[in-house]
Image: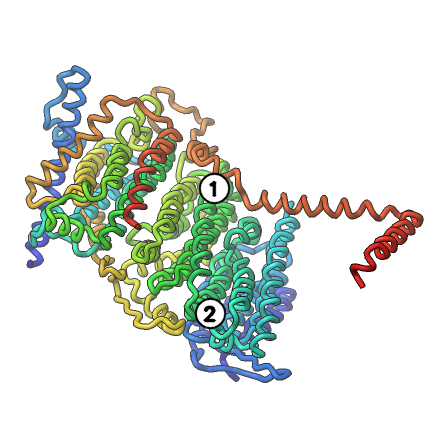
Amino acid sequence: MNTLVLLLILFFGGGLITYFAYKISKIIGDILIALIGLTGAYLFFQIDIHSLVSIKLAGLRLGLGFNGFSWIFGLLVAILSPLALIYSIPYMKGRERLEWFYMLFLFVIGAMFGILMARDWVSLFVFWEIMTWSSYLIVIYSRGKGLDKVGLKYIFFSAVGAYSLLTAIVLIGATIKSLYIGDLINFFGVLSLKNQLLIGILLIIGFGVKAAVMPLHVWAPDAYSSAPMSFTSLFSGAMSKMGIYGLILVVINMYLNHGISSVGHWLAWFGAITAVMGTFYAIIQDDAKKLLAWSSVAQLGYIVTGIGVGTKLAVFAAIFLALLHGAFKGTLFMAVGAVERQAGTTKFSELRALIRKMPYTFISTLIAVIALAGIPPIAGFIGKWMLYESLITDGHVWLVVLLFLASTAGFLYSYRILFGLFLGQEEDDYKDVKEAPVLMTIPMLLMALFLVVAGTLPGFVFKPIAQSMEALGFADITYQMSILTNSWGDMVDMTYVAMALGVTFVVFLIVITLVNRRGTRYVTTKDIHTAGEPPSEDDNYHFALDFFKPFERAIAPVFKYSMTRIYNVIGRGVEDFFQFVRRFYTGNAQTYALYVVIFFAILLLLAKQIF
Amino acid sequence: MTFWQTLGAVLLTILIAFISGLFYMGIRRKVIARIQNRYGPPLHQNFLDVMKLWSKESNIHHGIMQHLAPLWMIAMGVSTLLFIPIVYNSTFWANFTFKGDLILLLYLMVFGSLGFALGAGQTGNPNSAIGVTRGLSQMVGFEIPWVMALIAVMIQYKTTSLTDLVAWQQQHHTWIAFQQPFAFLAALLVIPAMFRYSPYDIVIAPSELASGPPSEFGGKYMGLMMSSGSIFMFAKLALIVDIFLGGATSWLWMIIKTLSLYMIPVLWSAINPRYRTEQAIWSLWRWPLIFAVLGLIIASV
């Protein structure tokens, strides 16, 4: 059987089998999902990139098969999903309805592969809906307070996206008489401008919902933070990239390759504003999950900006950032999940100083946060560098300023998450917290290791990206193992950066550890300088509330405008309108009779004009 | 250039930057003392301070991140210095200047402060954490006009490389400060905030936060921080000299230019009280931002 079909059968069939396996025994189920995840990754690497399964159905050509471009996103799913599944085993232990959760989990993974394989709009839409509905059911899986509202918001926006996708697909079928994605890309140039804009923008809305582009991002922060963290690492890490995949398809393959760049430039502005607003909202959160969720929205904004700008380096940076975002946001959601499981909460105002209790979680969080903040020599910097250079060399100066604002403000929440969870004054309440189980720390550490290696030797990641870029229609993609260059010929050699930082660090580490080793000692975090007022045993001087209050005050005007509020105003307006309409239905037969009479009177009066 | 020559140049650069940085700080103490009608400590007082700190008998730390905290600072100071051209057209003093560009430097320059912030956070002292949040907020304030000024320069000269900028200025016998006056003004106005001198000393704020983030650091940790601080200070000054003031053809010119530039934040800080955090941000988003926007508009049309 073809590997493509086998991969889909593995996840959809495996999902069903898992359902019954968990009914029989939890241990069998646990082993089964780990096996399915790993087999999926194995099968993915066996896939021949040129293999294609196609059938004719009611006169329409349908097909499944990867191409160079979708393969790179498949790579992300294939690597992230087994890690998330393995992490999930200890994380979800003891929760009820596991069979349900894991069945949906595997469906989501299978649907993601399906979307990337789909060569025609019908299969893409079917898998898209499977992914949406399965993830919706996982979001509301916990049955917590207020979760119905979160789920409603998610499914409402997904429905908006689905309807615009469907409308676009019907339009495509009507205009070019083919539902093959490749056909649309080839014939896009011949379409009338009206159809080009209509189809493209409907598709952008459809995909933009999953990529959480402003103003369609409203669902994302709540949905990301409400799902179990093992799923959110995949939800934010890989599933949001399906939206990015679709956006690249539309903006690059359809518009840019046929000479239309203005749509992309508009999208780039939306992306940059998303990045800034997402960052500002991340800063004011008190819950680590919420913070990461908003930060996901912001990070996807960068990627969307890169796609919208559409130059070679910008798209390269966008795909690179998309892969990296999967790795570091996956790690961060897993780390927060580990903290939640071990310490019982993710609120910054309750947690403190877990670094000595959970060292491995701390290390992976630290590396992921450095990647997120884009500080050299970890890989995040490379993506940021390429994005900025592409924008500067292409003259998009105001976009660069917005992105710089977002990433500098991003340092604030980066520090918040490290300080809030791991640093600060120790508290007796958390005295007995232990490190998370091995199965949870290993996936995190593996991804952190990847981020470190990719920071100095990004060529390993550049290679598949360059292939995918060629599949997208960009010519002459050159890359080097560790040297980054922009179109003006300026460059950064990451080995020198890593060497300068690393050698200095190690030399002085030896110096500072050896100098006066006898006189150096550890004291507790209660033993601090407090200007002559030593804290008593019960006092805790940890600083967690209103962490960035002065900054909030400085940017207060920005918070006056929020998309949620605008949607609420629209919603209330619509509600008022229908309340008004409802008054006509008095329930009195005589009033209705009067309406009929009035209607006929109007008809008679206007008869001349109408007939 | 053999490996040993490069290594020698690197070590000499670091040493000269370290010594001049400490002397600059000594001059600052002296200048401020004279303004306040005091006699002030001798110029070499900072050398004595560093030596004293390194030879302290007892050193305490609150955990591994605090132990590592000064190392991020020194790694940042040294690497930043190595990517900045000091002497124009010299193969011996080239260091790593052909291996990096301005965007790299922008990100390298926050590496240390963020690493140090983690160490300060681990101490458990609330003043440290408060200081860090203030510092990060202020950073958002000054990075925006600063980055805009740099982008204005970058797009006007179509390069992001510092060596190219220096070469252009040297070949045309002019300074970018005259070619891009608005960007230079914006950069000049954010220098006090970059150095965290009054009125932007909200991070250290001795009378409110008991010197904030470094308050739990003593002994060798403080000694290493002072050393890295002097190197980093010299690197920052050299960066601005390279971008706006034409770079330098010899070490002597570099020292003259950096020292004169350094006097601006020093003299400005001597006569200023302290802002609150949001005031600091707003002040940076007023005139510096206006000048930066003007510079950017001029450069991009």
Q: What residue does disc 1 label?
A: A432
Q: Are marks 2 and 1 on the same chain?
A: yes
Front residue of A104 and A312: A312
- Residue A153 position in % (x across, y down): 62, 52
Which structural element holds mark 2? helix
Residue A254 got which mark?
2
Identify the image quadrant of the C terminus of chain A. bottom right
Please indicate, yes or no, whether residue A36 appears anywhere in the rendered image.
no
- Residue A65 position in % (x across, y down): 49, 78
Against B222, residue A90 (above or below) is below
Task: From the image, state whether disc 2 or disc 1 is nearer to you.
Answer: 2
Q: Tell me if A109 is positioned left or right of A467 in this view.
A: right
Q: What colour scheme was applied to this rendering of the protein?
A: rainbow
**What chain does badge 1 belong to?**
A
Q: Residue at 16% across / 16% down in the picture?
A: B38
Q: Tell me if A576 is positioned left or right of A130 in this view.
A: right
Going by the numbered disc 1, the residue's amino acid type is: Asp
Q: Residue at 23% across / 57% down in the picture?
A: A492
Front residue of B263 and A80: B263
Going by the numbered disc 2, the residue's amino acid type is: Met
Please indicate, yes or no, whether residue A231 appears anywhere in the rendered image.
yes
Q: Residue at 33% across / 69% down in the picture?
A: A463
Which quarter of the picture shows residue A579? top right
